[in-house]
Image (cartoon, coloured by chain):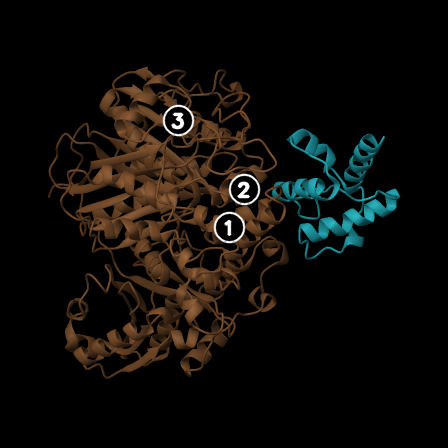
């Protein structure tokens, strides 16, 4: 059997360097910086800092800038491709936040105008644009988001179930990131000078990078995505590991994944943000992996700035340009390299043959991703298609308005509601005060869930974390912006900024559990937990334990503005669920599987198709005792109708639990439902049947819990 | 901006502010020794807290601390913070 190769068959790019691959190449070839004073908004009290803005970018203000940039870059990547992608996998950290900030500033209370706020809405927009009927996933791991999205896409394509994936990353400039990095004193007032002796920080930027990846068993001349590696420092919420351990681990893992040795790399595209700590840590990691004489290396962020979630994707495109044109981009901005780092990045751009590029992206939460792009030198050994034994559940936890796992499950099993919000004191019970003093609700919930899974029998620590959240850390986001606006953009809280990133809760879990494997946060409305399970499925290759969780906080002000089910659904509620899972090995317990997750009920999915996919009416009745139906309040009528049709078609004779009536309305309610399913199956007779959990909201999704 | 009274008053004020701003849940203001090491010491204060204190100094006392070296000196202890506030306020006032 020929190994499955993954080719980059389309690419699009938009950044301060240019609005196309050609413009980007031209700018890189000059080695000039494109940083300039911020103009997207006007800081009232301080001179605008240097940023990387896209020149001459105009757009219809009804659509947030991120959505617009994503469309422009994706249109480039999809040029010449007449087929719909099988999946859209994007890295995004702020989504529609730039628009949301304007709306909050003018005290707009109309939820309709916040409809594009969700970070997941960018990928959903692209999926509609290119008629994608498959999974739509938004990865949000701060500054490594784009690279992590591409790494997930690679794993999916190698798994053999997908042929073509549109993937990449996008982020616009907004107040949260501009003032946030400023409050952390991580912005260089003179513009980023990565690896320079006098560097003082980064320059925030905007942009989008998109690639179309296609799997093929044939070898051809095209540009290949050769490998990817993910890791987590599990060291600090913002600072990189001082010895670069996590970064080195991501690079090693990517090389192993690609079947390459360090000697095979011709050019290292550094993360190189220009902050003193990042560059120091990355330099040590490079020397760990490549020794004292690494290949030519440079950071493009002195020229482009740092477009956050887009960085890894744009730099993947730059890697292809480097190979295609025999160009090693210059390390713009650093006249005198820092002698302490013991590395000499290239000065001006150099012309030389480049066949293989390693590109680093590191983010808050110690979240590391490395991609390797190149033209294959020789055909590697034939590899077996990966096999995926199901996830065995070895522990679970839930938190709802009714309390922690035991209280929640007791009420849910007896059909009583768990709506409302658990008070902070009860939520944080058992968590050391010092661990939580800087954390707000969603991160507190994440730690409570992680703590809950580890207090189950046979407590074990996870090696990787997968976390799904529809809305992220709303308290920190609201408090940060409120403080900013109240002080006329003079003061902002560094703590709130750090906590506001979507991957802050998963980063906290990693810190607590020392989980140094992949640390992936995903977001996609009411199927955010399913996205986490989906990502864990494709990225888990060994039998080490993984923690898969979903949680959302109910925020008095923001939840009703962002989530239409909250405004339609009565008591403000929140909660989440978490599982400790293990693939194979010696684990025993019920099994958790994601059975179906794709498309849109309205456009692509018929009830017949779903029922067939689940094995048909007979099999469904034989396998399942319980059906947990998720009907978000905003889709109450349609969802109820879909449920009735499902019941008609299957003549399902088990027990049906309309779980949102019990949990209340929040994105990650399906995580709580999955925990309920696990507890029902676990306490039943051993030869009992399983439980089916189906989302009847906008995106159809089905999971099952089966007895061991 | 606050009117600066006696050193003892200023130290008490800073104790309360630090506990509040940094949400030091297991520390009472009166428990902090004005001369004890703030960062990396018993109180569990780290570099992120220093940045919060930088904002607090600017917001409440109008004082800017924009480099790490100065920050290390100012935030060595509550007394160095108080000294810095008094010195700078006298300079501005004088």
* Chain coloured brown here: A
Res A180 label: 2
> Does residue A457 show up?
no
Q: Are marks 2 and 3 on the same chain?
A: yes
Q: Secondary structure at mark 3?
A: loop
The one nearer the camera, A572 or A394, is: A572
Labels 2 & 3 near each other (Cβ < 8 A): no
Q: Secondary structure at mark 1?
A: helix
Instruction: Please give the residue where the numbered disc 1 appears in the rendered image.
Output: A500
Q: Circle 3: is it few (<14), some (14-19), or many (20+) Cα within 10 Å?
A: many
Residue A75: x and y in percent read 24, 40
- Counting residues from the start of the chain, the first of labels 2 and 3 encountered is 2
Q: Is residue A409 left or right of residue A152?
A: right
Q: Is residue A564 left or right of residue A255?
A: right
The one nearer the camera, A3 or A662, is: A662
Snapshot quadrant of residue A672: bottom left
Q: Circle 1: is it few (<14), some (14-19), or many (20+) Cα within 10 Å?
A: many
Instruction: Please give the residue where the numbered disc 3 appears in the rendered image.
Output: A300
- Mark 2 — on which chain does it sit? A
Residue A40: x and y in percent read 46, 37
Q: Nearer the viewer, mark 2 or mark 3?
A: 2
Quarter of the N terminus of chain A within the rendering: top left
């Amino acid at each position: 059997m020929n190994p499955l190769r993954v080719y980059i068959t389309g690419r699009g790019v938009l950044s301060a360097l240019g609005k196309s691959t050609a413009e980007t190449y031209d700018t890189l070839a000059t080695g000039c910086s494109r940083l300039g004073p911020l103009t997207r908004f006007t800081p009232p009290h301080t001179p605008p800092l240097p940023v990387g803005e896209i020149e001459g970018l105009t757009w219809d203000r009804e659509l947030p800038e991120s959505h617009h940039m994503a469309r422009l870059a994706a249109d480039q990547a999809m040029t010449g491709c007449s087929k719909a992608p099988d999946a859209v996998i994007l890295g995004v950290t702020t989504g529609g936040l730039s628009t949301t900030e304007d709306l909050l500033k003018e005290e707009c209370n109309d939820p309709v105008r916040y409809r594009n706020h969700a970070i997941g809405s960018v990928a959903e927009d692209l999926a509609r644009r290119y008629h994608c009927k498959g999974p739509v996933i938004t990865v949000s791991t701060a500054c490594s988001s784009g690279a992590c999205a591409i790494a997930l896409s690679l794993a999916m394509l190698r798994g053999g179930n997908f042929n073509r994936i549109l993937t990449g990353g996008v982020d616009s400039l907004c107040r949260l990131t501009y003032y946030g990095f400023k409050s952390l004193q991580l912005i260089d007032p003179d513009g980023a000078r990565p690896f320079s002796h006098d560097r003082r920080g980064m320059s925030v930027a905007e942009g989008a990078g998109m690639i179309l990846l296609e799997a093929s068993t044939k070898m051809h001349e095209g540009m290949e995505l050769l490998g990817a590696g993910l890791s987590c420092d599990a060291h600090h919420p913002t600072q990189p590991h001082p010895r670069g351990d996590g970064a080195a681990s991501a690079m090693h893992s990517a090389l192993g994944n690609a079947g390459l040795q360090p000697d095979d790399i011709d050019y290292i595209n550094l993360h190189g943000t220009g902050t003193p700590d990042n560059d120091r840590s990355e330099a040590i990691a490079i020397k760990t992996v490549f020794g004292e004489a690494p290949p030519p290396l440079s950071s493009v962020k002195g020229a482009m700035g740092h477009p956050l979630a887009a960085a890894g994707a744009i730099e993947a495109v730059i890697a292809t340009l480097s190979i295609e044109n025999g160009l090693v981009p210059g390390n713009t901005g650093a006249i005198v390299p820092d002698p302490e780092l013991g590395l000499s990045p290239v000065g001006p751009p150099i012309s030389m043959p480049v066949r293989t590029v390693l590109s680093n992206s590191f983010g808050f939460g110690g979240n590391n991703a490395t991609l390797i792009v190149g033209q294959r030198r020789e055909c590697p050994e034939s590899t077996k298609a990966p096999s995926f034994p199901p996830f065995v559940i070895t522990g679970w936890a839930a938190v709802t308005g009714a309390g922690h796992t035991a209280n929640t499950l007791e009420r849910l099993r007896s059909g009583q509601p768990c709506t409302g919000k658990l008070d902070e004191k009860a939520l944080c019970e058992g968590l050391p005060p010092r661990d939580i003093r800087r954390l707000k609700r969603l991160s507190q919930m994440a730690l409570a869930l992680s703590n809950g899974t580890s207090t189950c029998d046979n407590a074990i620590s996870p090696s990787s974390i997968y976390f799904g959240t529809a809305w992220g850390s709303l308290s920190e986001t609201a408090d940060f912006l409120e403080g900013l606006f109240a002080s006329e953009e003079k003061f902002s809280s560094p703590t709130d900024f750090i906590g506001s990133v979507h991957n802050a809760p998963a980063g906290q879990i990693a810190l607590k559990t020392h989980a140094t494997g992949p640390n992936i946060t995903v977001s996609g409305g009411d199927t955010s937990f399913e996205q986490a399970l989906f990502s864990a499925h494709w990225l888990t290759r060994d039998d080490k334990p993984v923690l898969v969780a979903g949680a959302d906080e109910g925020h008095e002000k923001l939840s009703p503005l962002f989530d239409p089910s909250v405004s339609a659904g009565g008591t403000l509620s929140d909660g989440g669920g978490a599982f400790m899972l293990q693939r194979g090995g010696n684990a025993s317990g019920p099994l958790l599987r994601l059975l179906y997750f794709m498309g849109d009920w309205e456009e692509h999915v018929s009830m017949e198709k779903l029922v067939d996919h689940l094995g048909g009416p007979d099999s469904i009745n034989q396998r399942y005792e319980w059906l947990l139906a998720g009907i978000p309040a905003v889709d109450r009528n349609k969802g109820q109708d879909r449920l009735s049709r499902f019941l008609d078609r299957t003549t399902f004779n088990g027990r049906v639990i309309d779980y949102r009536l019990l949990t209340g309305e929040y994105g990650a309610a399906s995580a709580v439902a999955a925990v309920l399913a696990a507890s029902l199956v676990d306490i039943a007779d051993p030869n009992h049947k399983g439980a089916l959990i189906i989302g009847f909201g906008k995106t159809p999704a089905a999971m099952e819990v089966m007895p061991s | 901006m606050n009117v600066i009274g006696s050193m003892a008053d200023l130290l008490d004020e800073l104790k309360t502010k630090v506990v509040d701003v940094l949400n030091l849940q297991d520390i009472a203001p009166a428990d902090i020794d004005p001369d004890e090491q703030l960062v990396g010491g018993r109180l569990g204060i780290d570099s992120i807290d220093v940045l919060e204190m930088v904002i607090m100094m600017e917001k409440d006392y109008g004082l800017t601390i924009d480099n790490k070296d100065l920050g290390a000196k100012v935030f060595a202890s509550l007394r160095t913070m108080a000294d810095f506030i008094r010195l700078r306020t006298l300079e501005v006032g004088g």
